Image (tube, rainbow, N blue to C red):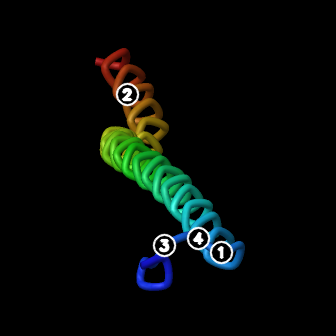
Amino acid sequence: MAAAETVLALSSNQSAWWATLAIGLVVLLVVIALLEALRRSVVALNKDIWKTWVSGKSVVAHTATTYLLTNTRSSSDELVDELGHH
């Protein structure tokens, strides 16, 4: 009966494969975690960049004609001089 019984034992080769698979699983989980952290950072950065872009466009829209202030000042000076004559 001893010859008919089969004992299932892991050989050293099978143990090495299981250890390799376990280590591979751990590495895979670490890589997934790092990629998720990178993805979240990129999403947050994208939101911040978009806010900066919108704010920058607003600043440009409000300051696009500031070069005209020089003309306005010289025109107002001329107007004051002309009013002084009357």
Percent coordinates x, y for residue 4 in the rendering:
42, 84
Q: Which residue lies furthest to the bottom in this view?
A: 4
Marks 2 and 1, how far apart at CA: 97 Å
Secondary element at image label 4: loop
Indicate which disc residue 34 carries: none
Q: Which residue is drawn at 37% across and 51% down?
A: 43
Q: How far apart are marks 3 and 4 (CA)?
A: 7 Å
Q: Mark 3 or 4, which is nearer the eye?
A: 3
- Quarter holding the N terminus? bottom left
Secondary element at image label 1: loop
Disc 1 to disc 3, how far (Cα)? 9 Å
Which residue is at a point 42% across and 22% down the rendered structure image? 81
Q: Where is residue 78 in the image (x, y as percent from the top left)?
A: 42, 31
Disc 1, disc 4: CB below 8 Å?
yes
Q: Is residue 57 above or below residue 80?
A: below
Amino acid type, callout 3: Leu
- Is 38 on the left-hand or right-hand side of 15? left
Q: In this figure, what is the number of numbered marks?
A: 4
The residue tagged 3 is 8
Q: What residue type is labelled 4?
A: Leu
Numbered tag placed on residue 76 in the rendering:
2
Task: From the image, tell me which residue sits under label 1.
Answer: 11
Residue type at numbered disc 2:
Ser
Q: Locate residue 72: give its quadrant.
A: top left
Residue positioned 34% across, 42% down in the render: 51
> Of the numbered discs in the image, which one, if any, rests on residue 10?
4
> Which dot, 2 or 1, sits closer to the camera?
1
Residue 41 appears left or right of 24: left
Vertical comparison of 10 with 38: above or below: below
Mark yes or no: residue 64 visible: no
> Crowdedness of circle 4 by 10 Å Cα count: few (<14), some, many (20+)?
few
| Residue type at the position of mark 1 | Ser
